[in-house]
Image: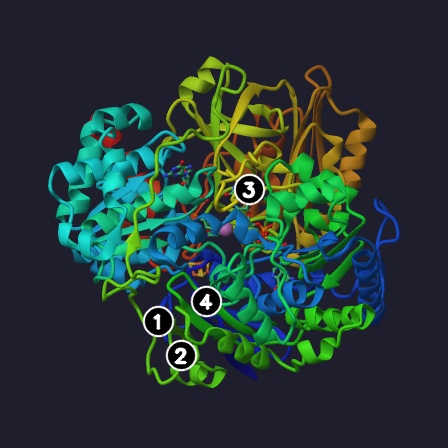
Amino acid sequence: MKTEVKSTCCYCGVGCGVLIQAEGERIVGVRGDPEHPSNRGRLCTKGATLNLTTDPSYRLHYPERRSERGQGTTRTSWGEALDEAAERFAATIRQHGPDSVAFYISGQLMTEDYYVFNKLAKGLIGTNNIDTNSRLCMSSAVAGYKQTLGVDAPPCSYEDILLANVIFIAGANPAVAHPIIFRYIEDARAANPDLKIIVADPRRSESAEIADLHLPIKPGTDIALFNGMLHVLIGDHLVDDEFISSHTTGFAEQAEIVERYTPEAVAEVCGVPAQDIVQAARWFGQNGAALSIYCQGLNQSAHGTHNNAAIIHLHLATGQIGKPGAGPFSLTGQPNAMGGREVGGLSNLLSAHRDLANPQHRSEVASLWGVQSVPDKPGKSAIDLFSALKSGEVKAVWIACTNPAQSLPNQAAVREALQAAEYVVLQEAYANTDTAAYADLLLPATGWGEKHGTVTNSERRITHVNSAVPAPGEARHDWEIAVDFARRLGARLGVDASRLFPYADAETIFNEHRESTRGRDLDITGLSYKRLDADGPQQWPYPQGATYGKGRLYEDGVFPTGDGKARFVPVRHLATADIPDAEYPISLLSGRMRDQWHGMSRTGTVPRLFNLEDEPVLAMHPCDMRHRGLSSGDLVRVANNRGESIVRVEERPGLKKGRAWMPMHWGSQFMNTPGVNAVACDATDPYSKQPELKHAAVQIEKIDLPYPLAVVRRCANQSEALALLQATRHALARYPYATVGLYGRKSPLVVLRAATAEALDDTAIGALDTLFGIDGSDGAIVYVDSKRRVAKKAVAEGGRLLAVRLCGETQAVTWLRQAMAEDELDASLIRFALAPLGKPPVGVAPRNIICKCADVTDVQIRQEMADGADMPKLQEKLRCGTFCGSCVPEIRRMVAEYAPTEAAAA
Ligand SMILES: Nc1nc2c(c(=O)[nH]1)N[C@H]1C(S)=C(S)[C@@H](COP(=O)(O)OP(=O)(O)OC[C@H]3O[C@@H](n4cnc5c(=O)[nH]c(N)nc54)[C@H](O)[C@@H]3O)O[C@H]1N2
Ligand SMILES: Nc1nc2c(c(=O)[nH]1)N[C@H]1C(S)=C(S)[C@@H](COP(=O)(O)OP(=O)(O)OC[C@H]3O[C@@H](n4cnc5c(=O)[nH]c(N)nc54)[C@H](O)[C@@H]3O)O[C@H]1N2
Ligand code: SF4
Ligand SMILES: [Mo]
């Protein structure tokens, strides 16, 4: 019997509601929850393929321990595992004090999980050494809101997108990173012809495609831009004097600072025309309701807090806050980064938006928890925590639901730290992540579809997440693991932990968390699991007696600052931490792609999510490429004093000279280096301690690896493909350049690409064939040109191409991969696969699937455009871009790029 269970998508902070379809113990489908107010039934490509990430074969099933680093792991029982962990933590604490241990957790945990971890560190052990990956993500937004508005609360709702007259997107790429929010932006555009959309992004991002004005500012110059806009707003009398005097403080000082930020001066700093700055300011000030949407382009900066403050200033100066369609709307990245902020899950925060530095707050939390005190010494924030592990100041670390051996900047230092740590526990849902190699103890956690609890999304909306299926193997819920460990640790430290952690279920934890919010800005004392189930997801605050939550904050112009007034804080332009110079002249940006999620532990198991891109590609400006003698498809070394990575380079539209861009997703599981974080910058913001992940100064140079090789292997199903992928990982280190991924839809493929300085010898080629199970001669055709060091092999099975291995010449891989994925290639076409230069047979054009929902390729789209189809026609005829809509910007770009060529021809 099929059941449908209400849950949420476990990827981004939009927090879409989903209905999980389960049959027995198996998840068989997923669809958008039409009743969820945040997405109203819509899902993007990642949400819509969640059911494909639940194959148990790549999950962690049992606790595993490693007796020696570098050795394999062996299965153990929960009792032994947690006793060992408790023993090690207790011994370390006894010998070196509570600050010698630390927790590094995640915005992808449930609020209940988060709450327990926080209490475990701050309440039971007595250390504030608990930080999370939100430090890499939202901590500048938290600090920015607190400095200006008083508390950490995004004041807007998604509804405001539809009510805005001007949308200012700064340092965010929602078309890719928050697709359902981008759907709202498109809806707003369609409904309101007067809407103005401004995008500030050093790249012409996918989101910039919808903009009326794109400001391709120099990386890290946002404060100059925002101060320049404030300058224009003041000069043009577009500020709201009444709002400023009644509801804010500090305006005069900031007004004095921005006097020098003339459009001309700012144009110089930001590298955009002065009139564009004036235009942006005028639209912001004149058009009516102004909504800013921002994310990591502002947060991930060594002055991220002030980036946030400077954009919030624009709203305070114009009174564009607390009104329909207006406000500074920081998008949260992870599905429950907000919940983590609510429970105070950072090393400087306490439950319910309390501050560690505030003695009153500490004693309130101590009495809520029934402990004597909460330590006052600030804990270590992520970057410092890993330095302390390296220096030995922190000796044992518990990592849950995050993958620091990929996602932290300056990986060489991070990996040294993990290596140096005396004891590392990793609580993970999946078996393969870069961090797992460093864990002494691996604890299996339940994942999406199995877990339960509550999450809060970007618009402060809390959803009750239900389990649809039981845990695989012996996996346990994150909160259960933390509670069990806490009790065992308490017993060893002489603390009655069963009194502190009496929880038998997640609901009891929620109720305790709820109580901690009483009377605070995020008061949720009116909520319960029961109410959430009966009335659906609710926004906070939702105090006792309320019948609905608050969609919009500060409607009364009163801010939670003590004097009720919001604050302008003095902010000035500052340079990025890593300034490009002669040695490292290129500013490297990093960020997201539509179909992958962070370290790809989940999205990297779904073949179709590689169809957009199955290899990490560095995008560069044609002039910078020419200058280095590079052509698209060449391999380059990206390097600075922190590390290096070898990747393929491509000319991509949308980048200015001196800038390059690389996705953050590929790490050592899918290539043979840690990826972009080998070189990313670990300098931090002084207030938020968030690292400057967005900008690194690097040198990019051609690397001579003249012998390319590629293998494409068709697999019977996803499980078989994943097993092969796993086996292939061990081979990546053999080559100076190597990447492996999946591809396809009907027939999943494993695709390996590599390059070497010397041609592979027969033994090495033989080993490669064995790895891919094509070492026999049955159904095989080979082509060898020893003079050119070319060696190719194609293997057919049952009349269909099974695998192709190409050494020395690999051009065919692009069309082959596509044709094999579509099962089009019969064995008679094998010779084309092996032909010199690898030209495709007539009729088999290289193609890419653009719309994954409707399975529409670029070739089909181009064909229709040649017949005169425009965007609506394409959507009508091919149905592309009419399901989740994530490919719409891309199709639109194809249409835009197609038109001029046609016009020229005519
Ligand atoms: N598909 C997908 N979606 C995701 C995620 C994912 O892994 N995959 N992760 C989620 C998470 S945790 C997060 S935090 C969000 C991140 O969401 P976003 O912040 O929207 O995404 P990013 O790609 O990190 O960066 C956004 C943009 O910032 C620009 N940028 C870089 N430097 C600057 C600068 O100095 N100034 C300005 N104005 N812009 C700059 C980049 O060019 C990029 O286009 O995405 C969430 N959604
Ligand atoms: N260069 C560069 N680096 C970046 C960024 C960037 O833009 N550029 N962005 C940064 C940002 S904003 C973020 S948020 C971080 C994200 O960085 P990470 O937190 O490292 O990213 P994930 O890969 O999502 O890691 C989550 C892990 O938890 C596991 N997991 C999934 N569900 C569960 C569960 O229910 N329980 C447990 N215990 N485990 C689970 C997953 O398998 C995965 O390995 O990366 C940061 N790093
Ligand atoms: S926008 Fe996509 S990734 Fe984000 S929550 Fe919704 S379905 Fe999931
Ligand atoms: Mo994030």
Q: Is mark 4 within 8 Å of ligand 3?
A: no
Q: Amino acid at mark 1?
A: Pro
Residue furthest out toward the front: 359
Residue drawn at 21 percent across, 29 percent down: 263
Check the picture and name the quadrant holding the C terminus: top left
Label 2–label 1 contact, CB within 8 A: yes
Report x, y in % for residue 592.
48, 44
Residue 229 - label: none
Answer with left or right where residue 172 lies relative to residue 800. Answer: left
Q: Which residue is mark 2?
A: 536
Q: Which residue is mark 3?
A: 614
Spatial CA distance of label 3 from label 2 is: 39 Å
Mark earlier in primary sequence (4, 1) = 1
Spatial CA distance of label 2 from label 4 is: 13 Å
Q: Is mark 2 within 8 Å of ligand 3?
A: no
**SS under mark 4:** strand
Q: Which residue is mark 1?
A: 37
Report x, y in % for residue 714.
64, 48
**SS under mark 1:** loop
Mark 3 or 2: the one toward you: 2
Spatial CA distance of label 2 from label 1 is: 8 Å
In the rendered image, the vertical position of residue 75 relative to residue 733, given as above or below: below
Mark earlier in primary sequence (2, 4) = 4
